[in-house]
Amino acid sequence: MIRVILPPHLRTLAQVGREVTLEVEGPVTQRSVVDAIEAAYPMLRGTIRDHVTQQRRPLMRFFACGKDVSHQAPDEPLPAEIAGGSEPLWILGAIAGG
């Protein structure tokens, strides 16, 4: 089981708590985790990544084991601690302003 921490606005939309657990088929990558999130919580489709390009939305960030992995390739394996469920993958919404 993969553990994922969602930002407050996505928790509200999905009506879930701070952390969700998911079954991920195959290698544990950003893409496979987001696929699993969108399958389990269809209301989140398009909120983490674009519907058409499937690329991460610019203000969404992924953190694994305290490191920002947002700019890694979406099919690059996440750390073993994430794949094993001992550490959660954090998905955060960046704040922008002007």
Image (spheres, rainbow, N blue to C red):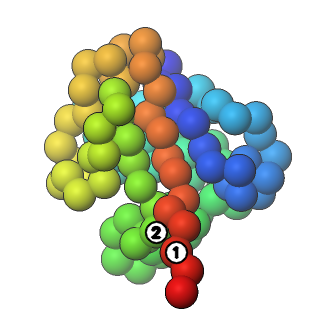
Q: Position of residue 26 (x, y in %)?
A: 30, 31
Q: Residue at x 48, y 39 (%)?
A: 90
Residue topped by disc 1? 96
Q: Which mark is residue 59?
A: 2
Out of 37 and 63, give the one closest to the viewer.
63
Q: Earlier in the sequence, mark 2 or mark 1?
A: 2
CB under 8 Å between discs 2 and 1: yes
> Residue shown at 63%/59% (left/top)?
44
Asked if residue 68 is positioned above or below residue 97 in the image, the reply reads above
Q: Residue at x 18, y 54 (%)?
A: 73
Q: Secondary structure at mark 2?
A: loop
Between circles 2 and 1, the one closer to the viewer is 1
**Distance from the alpha carbon under mark 2 to that under mark 1:** 8 Å
User: What is the total number of numbered labels drawn onto the structure image?
Assistant: 2
Q: Is residue 83 left or right of residue 42?
A: left
Q: Nearer the viewer, residue 39 or 19?
A: 19
Can you tell which quarter of the image residue 93 is in? bottom right
Residue 77 visible here: yes
Indicate which disc residue 49 carries: none
Q: Is residue 22 visible from the viewing direction of this image?
A: no
Farthest residue in the front direction? Answer: 98
Which quadrant of the rendered structure holds the C terminus?
A: bottom right
Tell me which amino acid carries mark 1.
Ala
1 sits left or right of 7 in the view? left
Q: Is residue 91 above or below residue 96?
A: above
The picture places residue 70, in percent across and down from the top left corner, at 31, 54
